[in-house]
Amino acid sequence: MTPTPWYEGRTSLDMLHGEGWAWIGLRSGDGLNRLHSDLLVALDHLFIELRWSGVRRVALSGAGWMAGRGHHFCAGADLHEVGALDAVSADPFSRRGQRVMAHLLWPGWRSLTVISGVAMGGGCDLALHGQERWAVAADASGKGGLRLAHPAAKHGILTGFGGTVRLPELLGQAGANRLFRDFETWHEDAALTAGAIQRTLLPGAVMDAVVAWLH
C-alpha cells in the first residue's frame, strides 16, 4: 500500500484509504508535525469527508509508520503562531483544535492514535483523544521511545484544545495533574501504567498491527 498525499502544508497529511477505513499520517520536513491553523482546518475537513463517506475505523499516526518506520507523533501547536494570538484570535484558534479532537471522539466510528516519539502539548491532546491509543516502544538500541508531556503552563499558555477535559476523563484528576501541573514526561511504560495508552508495540510491528485493526 502506498499513501496518497491529501494535504500539503508546513505539516502535511498522507492517507491510506480502503472500504470503511482510513489511516491518516502527519508529515513535515523536520518530522515534528506541528499543529498549525491551516493543518487544523485541513484535518477538520478531512474528518468530515471521511464521516460522510462511510468510514468507520480511522487511525492517526506519524506518516512514516505507513511505510514501516516512523518517528515523532506531534510536537504540539506552533508556538510562533500561539505567541502571536490575542484575545480575539485565540478563540477561533482553540475552536479549530477542539473540532479536530471532537471528530476523534465521534461515536459513529472507532478512532486509533498511534503515538510515537514526541507527543507534547497540543500533540498530547491529539494523541489522548483517540478512542484507542497505542504507543510505539523504543527500538533495540533504546532509541525512539515515547515522550508524552503537556508543558503548556511552563510557557504561560492555557491549553485550548480540550486536554484539560479529556485527561481527567482518562486518567482521573491525579493523573491529569501529573501532566498538566507537575510537568511529568511519560515513556511508554509509564503511560501504560497510568492508563493513557492501552497497548505498546515494537517498531517493526506497527504497520501490520494498524492494518489488522483497520480491517
Image: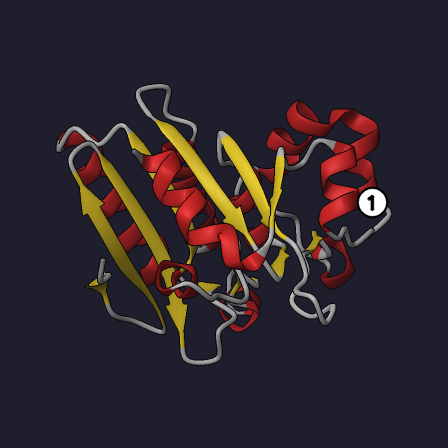
Outermost residue to the top: 107
What is the x, y in percent for residue 175? 79, 33
Q: Is residue 10 left or right of residue 132?
A: left
What is the x, y in percent for residue 15? 25, 55
In the picture, the quarter occupied by the C terminus is: top left
**Circle 1 sits on which residue?**
181
Local SS, label 1? loop
Q: Between residues 40 and 83, which one lies in front from this camera angle?
A: 40
Q: Is residue 95 visible?
A: no
Q: Is residue 23 left or right of residue 70?
A: left
In the picture, the quarter occupied by the N terminus is: bottom left
User: Residue drawn 56% across and 42% down?
Assistant: 134
User: Residue drawn 55% across and 38% down?
Assistant: 133
User: Residue drawn 20% across and 46% down?
Assistant: 17
The picture quadrant where one finds residue 28 is: bottom left
What is the x, y in percent for residue 89? 44, 56
What is the x, y in percent for residue 40? 36, 53
